Image (cartoon, rainbow, N blue to C red):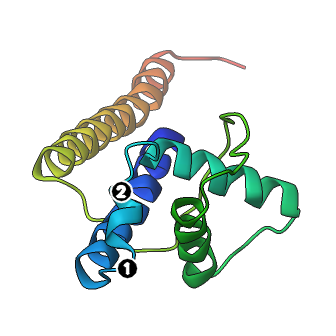
Amino acid sequence: MSQNKATEYFKRTIQQYLEQRAQEDELFRPRYANPQKNIDDCITFILNYVQKSGCNGFTDDEIYSLALHYYDEDDLDIGKPIQCNVVVNHTIELTDEEKAEARRNAIQRATNEAYAKITRRNSPKKNQETQSDTLTLF
């Protein structure tokens, strides 16, 4: 999975959690609906917190708690957007389009590998046949 897709998946996962939480928790619902807050700033806040912590891994609950903290606090320094590699340890579900693209890429790779294998196999034989037709006296 590319870095961008991993970050988008991370963002979607956090957003789904927050939306579900807002449906179930009437005290959180108005905080989540705050027009001064948005998912992009929430992700920036989480990523900056993680980077500053120096830790390499967090539990789901720790990350979700950071997202809730972002929406609960009115005066937070979210930090600047950062480019980083997000690793998500959840099963990634591909869209039908992504599955079709992966299938096309796999078929193309298999075709290329098969062609290269046939080409390599046939190349040495031609050289050997040419050499065997030539008589040498020494």
Percent position (x, y) of residue 91?
A: 37, 73
Q: Amino acid at mark 1?
A: Leu
Q: Residue at x 61, y 45 (%)?
A: 44
The kind of secondary structure element at disc 1 is loop
Q: Amino acid at mark 2?
A: Arg
Residue position for label 1? 27
In-image side of 29 versus 99 (left or right): right
In the image, is residue 55 above or below residue 70? below
Residue position for label 2? 12
Q: Residue at x 72, y 73 (%)?
A: 57
In the image, is residue 113 above or below residue 1? above
Of labels 1 and 2, the one closer to you: 1
Give the image quarter of residue 12. Answer: bottom left
Dot 1 or dot 2: first in sequence order is 2
Q: Which residue occupies the foreground of this view, 121 or 43?
A: 43
**Label 2 neighbourhood size at 10 Å, few (<14), some (14-19), many (20+)?**
few
Q: Residue at x 48, y 21 (%)?
A: 127
In three-dimensional space, the C-alpha distance between marks 1 and 2, rounded to whole angstroms, equals 22 Å
The kind of secondary structure element at disc 2 is helix
Q: Which residue occupies the foreground of this view, 23 or 44?
A: 23
Percent position (x, y) of residue 70?
A: 58, 60
